C-alpha cells in the first residue's frame, strides 16, 4: 500500500512539473529549471552521508568502542540482507537517530547519546530496524527525486515571477496572465505538500519494515512512545533541511503546519505498529 501511494504521489508530482512548466516557463524553461535542480540535488545525494554526518559532528565507532551498538547494527543488517553500514554516534542529549547514504553499500546509521540512554535494548533494536529499512528501500534516492522535481517547480515559479516583473506576462491575454500568476503561487505549495506526503509515506513503510527486521513491532512502538516525550523534553537543534531524515521530527509544529510535516502523526504510527501485532 505504501509503495502504491508513493508511486501515485510521484506521478502527481511529475504531472505537476509538466503542467507548471508549460504554464510558467514553457518547455525550454522547464528543461533548464529541471537540469539545475537535478545537478543541485544529485550533489546532495552523492555526498549526503558526508554532509549530514559532519553537520551533526557524528563520530564513527568500532566494535571495540561501542560493542553493544555495533553488534546490534551488524546483527540486524544481516537479518535484513544488507551490507554492514557504518555506525556513528552523535554526542547530543536529544534522543534521535537517522540513516543516510546513496545506496546500501555506502550507508550509515547514526544515533545520539540521548537515544542510547533513553531506550532499552529491544526499543533500540526497533529504531535501528527502522533506519535499516530506509536503507533497504533506498528512501534517500526517492527523497532526492522528489526534492529535484519540487525544486524545479519552485525554480520555474521564481523565473516566471522575475519575467513578469521585468518583461511582463509571457501571455498577453489577461486570462492567461492571471492563470500564470495563480500557477506561480499554487504550484510550489502543491509541490511541497506532495513532497512532504511522500516523506510521510516512506516513514510508514520504514516503520513496517523496521518491525519486520527487529522481529517485533512492539519494540518500535514502545520506542516511539518514549521518543515523543523525550524529544519534547530535550529538543534537538536541527536544520529543517535534514529534519526528514530523523526517526522523529526534531522540529515542532502543529495545526496547519502538520500539512508540511515530513513525519506522520506519532499516534497513527504507533497505532499501525500495534495493529501489526494482531
Image: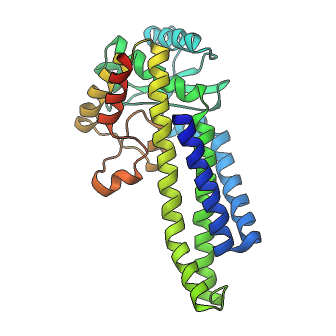
Picture quadrant where residue 44 is located: top right
Picture quadrant where residue 119 is located: top left
Coloring scheme used: rainbow
Q: Residue at x 51, y 18 (%)?
A: 61
* Vertical side of 23 occupied by 97: above or below: above
* Vertical side of 121 occupied by 205: above or below: below
Which residue is most to the right?
28
Indicate the quadrant containing the C terminus: top left, top right, bottom left or bottom right.
top left
Position of 20 compared to 39: left or right?
A: left
**How many numbered discs?**
0
Instruction: Give residue 17's position: percent from left, percent from top.
Output: 64, 61
Q: Which residue is drawn at 60% across and 25% down?
A: 136
Whether residue 89 is visible here, answered yes or no, is: no
* Vertical side of 73 occupied by 95: above or below: below
Instruction: Give residue 138's position: percent from left, percent from top.
Output: 61, 32
Picture quadrant where residue 31 is located: bottom right
Position of 41 compared to 202: left or right?
A: right
Whether residue 216 is visible here, answered yes or no, is: yes
Depth check: give the residue in front, 159 or 196.
196
Depth check: give the residue in front, 8 or 269.
8
Q: Residue at x 47, y 11 (%)?
A: 72
Instruction: Give residue 150's position: percent from left, percent from top.
Output: 58, 57
Q: Residue at x 51, y 45 (%)?
A: 198
Position of 28 compared to 160: left or right?
A: right
Amino acid at each position: 500500500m505504501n509503495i502504491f501511494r508513493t508511486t501515485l504521489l510521484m506521478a502527481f508530482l511529475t504531472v505537476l512539473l509538466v503542467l507548471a512548466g508549460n504554464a510558467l516557463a514553457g518547455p525550454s524553461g522547464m528543461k533548464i529549471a529541471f537540469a539545475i535542480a537535478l545537478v543541485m540535488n544529485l550533489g546532495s545525494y552523492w555526498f549526503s552521508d558526508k554532509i549530514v554526518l559532519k553537520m551533526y559532528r557524528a563520530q564513527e565507532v568500532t566494535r571495540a568502542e561501542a560493542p553493544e551498538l555495533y553488534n546490534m547494527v551488524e546483527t540486524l543488517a544481516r537479518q535484513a540482507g544488507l551490507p554492514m553500514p557504518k555506525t556513528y554516534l552523535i554526542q547530543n542529549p536529544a534522543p534521535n537517530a537517522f540513516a543516510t547514504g546513496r545506496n546500501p553499500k555506502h550507508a550509515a546509521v547514526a544515533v545520539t547519546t540521548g537515544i542510547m540512554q533513553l531506550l532499552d535494548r529491544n526499543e533500540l533494536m526497533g529504531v535501528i530496524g527502522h533506519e535499516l529499512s530506509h536503507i533497504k528501500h533506498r528512501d534517500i534516492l526517492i527523497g532526492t527525486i522528489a526534492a529535484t522535481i519540487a525544486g524545479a517547480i519552485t525554480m520555474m515559479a521564481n523565473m516566471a515571477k522575475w519575467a513578469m516583473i521585468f518583461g511582463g506576462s509571457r501571455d498577453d491575454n489577461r486570462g492567461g496572465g492571471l492563470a500564470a500568476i495563480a500557477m506561480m503561487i499554487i504550484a510550489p505549495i502543491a509541490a511541497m505538500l506532495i513532497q512532504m506526503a511522500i516523506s510521510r509515506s516512506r516513514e510508514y513503510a520504514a516503520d513496517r519494515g523496521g518491525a519486520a527486521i527487529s522481529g517485533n513491532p512492539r519494540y518500535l512502538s514502545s520506542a516511539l512512545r518514549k521518543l515523543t516525550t523525550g524529544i519534547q523534553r530535550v529538543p534537538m537543534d536541527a536544520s529543517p533541511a535534514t529534519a526528514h531524515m530523523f526517526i522523529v521530527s526534531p522540529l515542532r509544529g502543529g495545526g496547519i503546519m502538520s500539512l508540511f510535516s515530513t513525519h506522520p502523526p506519532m499516534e497513527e504510527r504507533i497505532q499501525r505498529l500495534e495493529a501489526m501485532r494482531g
